Structure formats: structure tokens, C-alpha cells
Amino acid sequence: MTKTLSLHTAAELIAAGLVDPASQAAIEAVGARYAIALTPAVADLIDRHDGCDPIARQFVPSAAELKTQPDERADPIGDEAFSPVEGIVHRYPDRVLLKLLHVCPVYCRFCFRRASVGPQAETFLSATALDAAFAYIEAKPEIWEVILTGGDPLTLSLRRLEDVVARLAAADHVKILRIHTRIPCVDPARITPELVDLLRAGGKTVYVVLHANHPRELTHEARRACAKFVDAGIPMLSQSVLLRGVNDDAATLAALFRGFVECRIKPYYLHQLDLAPGTSHFRVPIEEGQALLRGLQASVSGLCLPRYMLDIPGGHGKVPIESGYLAGDGRAGAFRVTDHRGAVHAYPPGRDGAHGPERAQD
């Protein structure tokens, strides 16, 4: 049997029916600037008869990526300012990112690290850099959590992952190992019992955070891959990005978040899109995102609601940006609370003569 290969070039995308031949020159220009890759699982999900297909929009390059806006930047969240050694980002006191590699099985067209990932980057941390990264972690007893990222850490071979898990196991002060990945959706066959057992072997509490943005990504195969983690006692969280033309409507977000919960994945973060170069065509205004979250608050279970987060440019960290439901003077003990229908109530009830309704069920 011939193995189906991933798609990396304009010519391959044209041959697969994913790009108009008239766009070849523009797509080649995009490919010269930013990495391109679609796995067979992703390519098979795309509806070639839908010019606005939300899966294609996430992964198939477009000429719009060649337009960079003045407020966009190569390092939109300021990782570099918090990188004491290569491969480490230490922005918050109790946790670090460990960027083991700079490649992914797929490349999102909105990636905030798009300027530093892909074939043009060094594939893996060198042995010397990896030693320095682990030495940094071992020397910082305040580091409680290590987050494996990159690139996608689950593209590493089992041998390389086993080495990473074993070395982290030796750091007693590290209690939590978190892994950020798209693999269960974009290459579910890589999630094997051997991989799951390997992640648990280090004795740390392991969390896997799945990145998916549209409910169609949660295929039967993806759900089975996620179940292998959860059935083995590894909790899963989700992170998604609010994207124009992909999930910028309440029905799609509700289906996505409910899909996560059905997979026993707790929706964790919905990110406001970072100011990465060539991504303005994906950007949804914050006030529109806030309105979407207000609507979801009224229509879906609390189990399904993530935090709506903004990573402040320049390295200032993440903050929740859901609409404020509470206003008033805490010193006087009087507040005004806005419910999901937009009605304003006094809290405590009866203050200023207003009485609110009974608390709704979660």
C-alpha cells in the first residue's frame, strides 16, 4: 500500500484540489515566508466544494498572509524577553515553557510562532541547548510546572520523548507536566498506548491540552485518540483561537465546546488572536468576542465555557477579557451585576431599592 504523504508545496496543494492553479505564484510566495504542511487527516476533512471551508481556512495558505499590518510583530507575545536560555520561556514564577522543537505536523495559517517554526528553523534543540534547558529547570525550585511546546512536542520520536520525561522525573520540585498539541486531531494514529504509557512513566501529574478550533476537527478518530489519554488517567483541556471565518459565531463555538466536553476535555482557553504577521484577515474584534461569550453564558452548560484570554503584546502575560459583569464601589459594599440577558441588578439584593432574581442553575 502506498503511504499518503503530507502536503507541503503549492504544486501539491493544486494537485490535491485545494488551491486554484491561478494562485500558484502567490502560494509559493507565502511558502517562501511561512511553513506549509497539511497531514492526510486534515486534507481529507476539507470540503473542496466549499470556498469558505473552515478547515481549509485554518491550514491552506492564502495570498492574504503576504499583507503585514503595522501592529503585527514576529514575536507578538514577547517570548524572547523571557527566554533566559535557548528553549526556555520563564514568564510566570511557577512554570516554564520548554520548546523542544520548531516543527509541527501541520502549520496553522494564524500561528503566533510562524516566524520561528518550520523547515527554515533548526528542527530540534541541540544536545547542548537541551542540557542547558534542563539545568535551568533543575536550578529553579520554584518551577512547579513544565509545559512542553514548540512546535508540537508529540511529533518527537518515542525515544526523544522518553528522554525528556525521564529527565524531568529527576527534578523533584516539578510536579506537573503539561503538553500542548494538535496531534490527536491532525494525526490521530500517532496516539498509541506506548506513547500514553511513556508520558505516565515519569511519575508527574500529566495534562494534555488539545488545540482545535472547529467541531469538525473532533472526528471519530480524534475522539478515540483523546480517549486513550483520558482512559489512562491523563486529564485533557482545550485551547482554541477565535478566528474570522472559522468559529466566529455562537453556534460553531457551542458545538466545539460541547464536543470537547463530550470527549471529556474541559474547555480551558479561547484566545484572542495574537498580532502575528500576515494574520489580520483572521482577527475578530474583542468586543465581538465578548458578545459571543455573553451569548454562550446564557445558552450552554458551565462545563462548556472557557476563559476568553488576551496575551498582552510585549510579554506582559495573559489576562481574561470577558465582559465585566460586575461594577460598583467595593468600599461601600454595593455593586451592580449584569445578567446574561443584559438586565442590571443590585448586589446585595435590595441595595438602592433593587431586587434581583433568584440565582440561575449552573
Image (tube, helix red, strand yellow):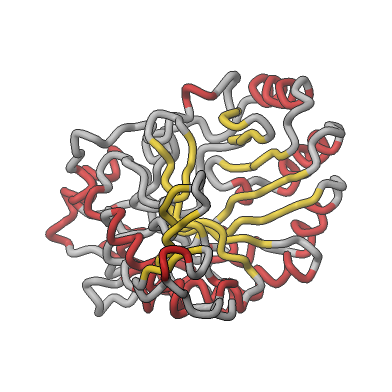
In percent of width and height, residue 167 lies at: 81, 34
Q: Does residue 191 appear anywhere in the picture? A: yes
Residue furthest toward the left? 22
Q: Residue at x 58, y 19 (%)?
A: 84
| Vertical side of 119 occupied by 188: above or below | below
Q: Quadrant of residue 70?
A: top left
Residue furthest toward the front? 353
In percent of width and height, residue 239 lies at: 52, 57
Residue 345 located left or right of residue 54: right
Q: Residue at x 27, y 47 (%)?
A: 279
In this rendered view, identify the residue nearer to me: 149 or 23. Answer: 149
Q: Does residue 44 appear anywhere in the picture? A: no
| Vertical side of 138 occupied by 313: above or below | below
In percent of width and height, residue 361 lies at: 58, 80
Q: Quadrant of residue 43?
A: bottom left
Location of the C terminus by quadrant is: bottom right
Residue 294 located left or right of residue 15: right
Location of the N terminus by quadrant is: bottom right
